[in-house]
Image (cartoon, rainbow, N blue to C red):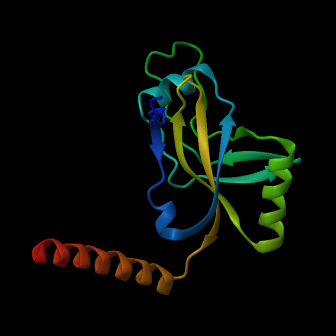
Amino acid sequence: MAKKEAPERKYAAQNRKARHNYFIDEVLEAGIMLAGTEVKSLRQGKANIGDAYATDKDGEIWLYNMNIPEYDSGGYSRHEEKRARKLLLKKREINKLLGAVQREGMTLVPLSIYFNPRGIAKVELGLARGKKNYDKRETVKKREWNKQQARLMRERG
């Protein structure tokens, strides 16, 4: 039997600075409640999640500061660009995340927004701890050492 390949994700937005600024302990997939023009704007790849974060409000998880610009051909049904958007998670997942955030001082950071193979928008959330400046420098040192090591191995054959 042939192996099934992982389906291709169509990314609408990625938060590249998140892995630089945080240690990502756990990654979780969540659905997101969007208006019709927001989905169309996401499909064009116009979203920005660089400043976004997730937090609880009345026992639910909400995503704040995510910027989805207005859809050009939206007509009269326009959406607010930086409104709070509800994330769709199971109650058990919500309790687990809220417990980690309250007890351990962690934060919820969106890592990417993508469309799954069925065409549904999903958010990849990371349960993260903040990095100090010396941690960031250490990460850069390791990355550059690995590049140099690979270069030396290629030269030697």
Q: Is residue 144 above or below residue 127?
A: below
Q: Position of residue 13 (x, y in %)?
A: 46, 42
Q: Which residue is more in the foreground, 60 or 9?
A: 9
Residue situated furthest bottom in the rendering: 134
Left/right placement of residue 153 relative to residue 125 reads: left
Count of residue discs? 0
Q: Which residue is more in the foreground, 20 or 66?
A: 20
Residue 66: quadrant of the picture = top right
**Could one spot residue 144 in this view of the protein?**
yes
Residue drawn 67% across the image and 35% down it: 32
Residue drawn 49% across the image and 30% down it: 42
Residue situated furthest top in the rendering: 75
**Could one spot residue 57 in this view of the protein?**
no
Residue drawn 26% across the image and 73% down it: 147
Left/right placement of residue 124 relative to residue 72 reads: right
Q: Position of residue 36 (x, y in %)?
A: 60, 19
Q: Quadrant of the C terminus?
A: bottom left
Q: Position of residue 52 (x, y in %)?
A: 59, 52
Residue drawn 77% across the image and 47% down it: 61
Left/right placement of residue 5 relative to residue 141 reads: right
Left/right placement of residue 12 relative to residue 107 reads: left
Q: Position of residue 12 (x, y in %)?
A: 46, 36
Residue 156: quadrant of the picture = bottom left
Q: Which residue is more in the foreground, 125 or 6?
A: 6
Q: Is residue 19 above or below residue 30?
A: below
